[in-house]
Image: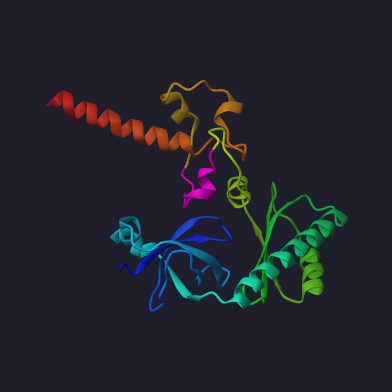
Amino acid sequence: MSEIVCVLSERSGKVLRAKKGKEDLKRGDICIIESELGGDLAVVVDTSSKICSHPKSVKDAVKVIRNATEDDKNKFKWLEKKEKKAFDFCLKMIKERNLPMKLVMVRYFFDEKKGIFYYTADGRIDFRQLVKDLAKEFKMRIEMRQVGVRDEAKMIGGLGVCGRVLCCCSFMKSFEPVTIQKAKKQKIAINPTKISGLCGRLMCCLAFEDESRGRMYTEEEKVEED
């Protein structure tokens, strides 16, 4: 049996590969996996496919910490409620202090010792007083983390013009540069409303299409040479 399993993250909604270690896991089991926030709840969706056990997947696989208990499940639900309250409070403070920033999301660490408040802004923001307000209210370490509009779309999610879940929040691990030249190469009408994603930037799939077309042309050239 493969030591790598595929799990569905409760937080991000992404399918990840995880090293199960000594844990005995089967499809449908709930477990705790490593994450930048100290832990994430995930459900096992596959344990034996070639996709899970592919050599390239082992390198990027996260570690399964343990099988989730009922207390773990209840704690994650509790954390979600705390994050929502923190979001509402932070939003209120931002409006009161008239700060030119947009709050995107709040995430608590599993041990509740730190909270990360993600936001977007056009420039640098002096949020020192805001941090004091948050630290006083929630009695924990506070980190304000600025993200771009593409990261915002990735975190919030949604559906693209194709009707499918956004690429950035379903399978992409990092953003690649997308230029208008890539749309021109594909002879796509340069209409901002049709080539822009929910984030307002050029759709990531323009880069996918450009790459696949490049491979297709290369194959055609090889055939002609032969």
Where, by quadrant of the figure, is residue 77 drawn? bottom right
In the rendered image, residue 147, in percent from the top left (x then y), is placed at: 62, 53
Q: Is residue 170 magenta?
A: yes
**Residue at 39% across, 33% down:** 210
Examine the rendered structure and indicate whether residue 219 appears above or below residue 26. Answer: above
Q: Position of residue 91 (x, y in %)?
A: 80, 56
Q: In this picture, which residue range is highlighted in magenta?
A: 164-176
Where does residue 127 sit, x and y in percent of width and height? 76, 61
Which quarter of the image is occupied by the N terminus? bottom left
Residue at image point 75% right, 51% down: 101
Which quarter of the figure has residue 113? bottom right
Does the magenta segment cover residue 5?
no
Q: Is residue 161 left or right of residue 3?
A: right
Q: Nearer the viewer, residue 98 or 114?
A: 114
Q: State the residue lying farthest toward the right.
A: 96
Instruction: Tell me what residue is drawn at x 70 percent, y 70 percent.
Output: 78
